[in-house]
Image (cartoon, rainbow, N blue to C red):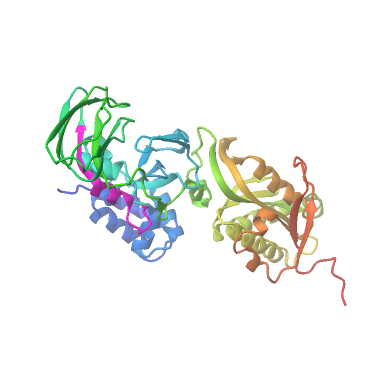
Amino acid sequence: MVTEINEKLLDERLAALESGRTWSPRVVSKLENHIHSGEDAELFRINPCSFAAEKGIPEDEAIDIFLHASALGLFEMDWFLLCPLCSCVIDSFRTLRRIDSHCHCNLCHLDFDAALDDQIAIGFTVNPDIRKIIYHNPQQLSAEDYNFQYRSAIEGLIPDETPFTVVKRAITKALAFIEPGEKKTFDVDAEAGALLGTTPDGDATFLFPIDTTLAPKEQHIELSCSEDVCDAADGSVSPGRVVFDITNTGTKRLAFLIWQLPPGISKPPPLHFAPFLSGKRLLTTQTFRELFRSETTGQGLAIKDITLLFTDLKGSTALYNHIGDLNAFSLVQQHFDRLQNVTVRNGGAIIKTIGDAVMAAFRDPAHAVRAALEMREEMGEVSHGTSGRELILKIGLHKGAVIAVTLNDRLDYFGQTVNIAARVQHLADANDIYLSEDVYTSPGVGELLESSRVEARNARLRGVDQEIPVFRIAPQQSPEVQPA
C-alpha cells in the first residue's frame, strides 16, 4: 500500500511546531519519522505515554508535543470511553463536550458511569489532511481491524501483562460483518467450554455450552439477531463442527464474533491498564488548558480523586495603597507567573485566578505539597530587597472527588472538595501552609515534611458539620518562635 503524505503541509506545520516552543533534541524529528514510517495502526489513537517510552522522550514532553501538534492540525484528539472489564472502546468523541459519562458496554452487558480518572482516555490520530489512514473511515475497515483495533484498546492487560485484545483474538473462532437482512454462515469447531456469540454494536448474544459427554458430530444452528437480541434457544451442543446460519433482522450492520470460552470461564480475567493519558491528567496539564480553552464539558464529569491547592496574598490591599496600583500590579503579575511555573514543574495546572488568589489542581498529593513549599520559597525571592513590598502567601490543600464542569466558559471543578480546600486555605496566616488530613496522610507527603515544623489541630470549617483535623506547616522563620 502506497502511503500518501501531504509533504508541503507537513513541513509547514512541523516548522510551526518547532518554532512554537523549545523542545528537547530530536523530539520533533522523531514525531516526523513516525508520521512518515508508522503503520496505519500506529498513527491511530496514539498513546503519548507509550510513545514516550518507545522513543525515549520524557512523558510530560510527549503529551505537550501532541497537544501542540493537535492545535496546529498535525493530529486530531480522540476522547474515548474504556470498559474497565474488557478494555473495549465503548465510544469515541472528537471533543470533550460530546462525552456522555453514562456508559453501556455491549460485550460485558455492563452499565456504569465513566470517570475522568480511568475510563476516559485521550489518544492522537494523524490528521487526514497530512496523511490518510484506514482508520479515518471505520465503515471501510475489515471486521478484524474494526473489532481488534477500532473497538479495542491495547492498554488493557491481564495479570501476566498480555493485552486482553490479544486474548480476544486468540479465542475468536469466527468473525464477520452481517448487513441488515443478510444471512451469514459461521463455521466453527467446538471444544470443551462454551461458544459465545456477541457483538460490540449491540446487546445481541448467545451462549452454547459444549457437552463433552456427547459424541462429536456436525450440527447446524439457525438463528436471528438484531442489535439487541438473539433468538437462540437454550441448550448445549456436542463437540465437533458447528455451523451457525445467522440472519441480521435489525436495522444496522453488526460485527459478529463467536468466541470459544475455556471450561469454567464465565467472565473476563481481572484487568489492569498500561499507562495512558487519562482525562484527569489532561485536565491537570497546563498546556491543554492554554491551547484548548474552548474545550468545555457538555455535562458534569466525575473525577474520583484530585488534589486542590488554593493560595491568597496577605495584605494585598495595603500593598496597592503603599506602592501604587502600577507597581503593585507588576509585582502581583510576577507572583502569578512564579506560581504557574512552580505548578507546572510539579505536574499541576492553574485552574483559575480569583483576584489575587490562585486555584491549582494536581493528580498527586505529594506533588501538590512540594509545589506549596516551593511557592512559599518563590515568594521570598520575589520579595527579596523590596522593603514594604513583600508578597506573603497563604496556602491550603485538600483532596477528594470533584465534578469537572464548565463555568463562565472555562473548565472548572465543583463540589464539597473544592469548598473544603478553599476553607482550609482561609485558616492560613502569613506564609502558612495548611493541609487537610487526607493530603497529610497521602503517600510521599511525610517524607517531604520531615524537616518542617508541623502543628496538628482540629478546625471547624463553614459548611462542614464537624471539626476536621488540619495540619499547619509553619514558616521556617515563624514569628511565633522566640529566640533562646
Q: Quadrant of the C terminus?
A: bottom right
Res. 392 visible in picture: no
Membership of 176 in magenta stretch: yes
Q: Position of residue 384 (x, y in %)?
A: 73, 67
Dividing the picture into quarters, in which one does residue 300 lie? top right
Dividing the picture into quarters, in which one does residue 73 lie? top left
From which residue to which does the magenta span run?
157-177
Between 244 and 102, the one nearer to me in the picture: 244
Which residue does the image show at 42% across and 53% down from the upper left? 272
Membership of 85 in magenta stretch: no
Q: Position of residue 177 (x, y in %)?
A: 21, 33
Which residue does the image show at 42% across and 50% down from the upper left? 67
Q: Position of residue 61 (x, y in %)?
A: 44, 59
Which residue does the image show at 38% across and 66% down from the upper left? 25
Which residue does the image show at 36% across and 54% down from the upper left? 158
Between 147 and 356, the one nearer to me in the picture: 147
Q: Is residue 263 above or below residue 410?
A: below
Left or right, residue 172 beside residue 229: left
The outermost residue toward the left is 218
Q: Position of residue 174 (x, y in %)?
A: 19, 40
Between 25 and 402, the one nearer to me in the picture: 402
Q: Is residue 447 above or below residue 393?
A: below
Res. 275 visible in picture: yes
Report how many numbered discs are placed on residues in the image.
0
Left or right, residue 369 beside residue 160: right
The outermost residue toward the bottom is 484
Q: Is residue 339 above or below residue 88?
A: below
Left or right, residue 303 beside residue 98: right
